[in-house]
Amino acid sequence: MTKPVFDKAQVTLEYPDKFYSGTFERSSRFEVSFDATGLLLLLEHPGSEDVRKSVHIHINYGLFSDILQESCLQVPKIPKDGIHLEQLRRAVSAFEQSLRAVPADAMN
């Protein structure tokens, strides 16, 4: 089920002969899910053919774990003013609680 984007995401794809860039803001939606191999993130901006866009990103669990681990080193760069730090604290806490709720024998 898609949810509204309340902040913003910017996506850039750069190839040797092509460059794509897009922004997903409040009129956009996102969906996140997990499958047998990793995380799937969908960003979509609805509308007519000339403005409609979507990005589908699949990240395997090993890379997702590496991204989370590397993100820990970047936490000091998060601005201390504003609501983002508290939003992140709540989200990380909820994610950790969800992981702990998975029975240990289900992880084999």
Image: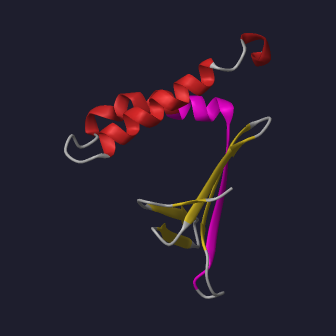
Q: Is residue 25 above or below residue 70?
A: below
- Residue 62 is inside the magenta segment: yes
Q: Which residues are magenta?
A: 51-67
Where is the C terminus found, in terms of image quarters?
Answer: top right
Residue 105 is situated, as x and y percent measured from the top left of the image, at: 78, 11
Which is more toward the observer, 11 or 54? 54
Residue drawn where x is 53% and y is 24% of the image: 96
Which is more toward the observer, 22 or 79? 79
- Residue 8 is inside the magenta segment: no
Which is more toward the observer, 39 or 93? 93
Residue 44 is situated, as x and y percent measured from the top left of the image, at: 61, 67
Where is the N terminus found, in terms of image quarters?
Answer: bottom right
Residue 28 is situated, as x and y percent measured from the top left of the image, at: 53, 69
Q: Quadrant of residue 79?
A: top left
Q: Is residue 89 left or right of residue 78?
A: right
Q: Quadrant of residue 25?
A: bottom left
Q: Is residue 3 above or below residue 24?
A: above
Q: Is residue 33 left or right of residue 13?
A: right
Which is more toward the observer, 4 or 55? 4
Residue situated furthest top in the rendering: 105
Coloration mode: secondary structure
Residue drawn where x is 72% and y is 11% of the image: 104
Residue drawn where x is 52% and y is 35% of the image: 67
Residue 7 is situated, as x and y percent measured from the top left of the image, at: 41, 59
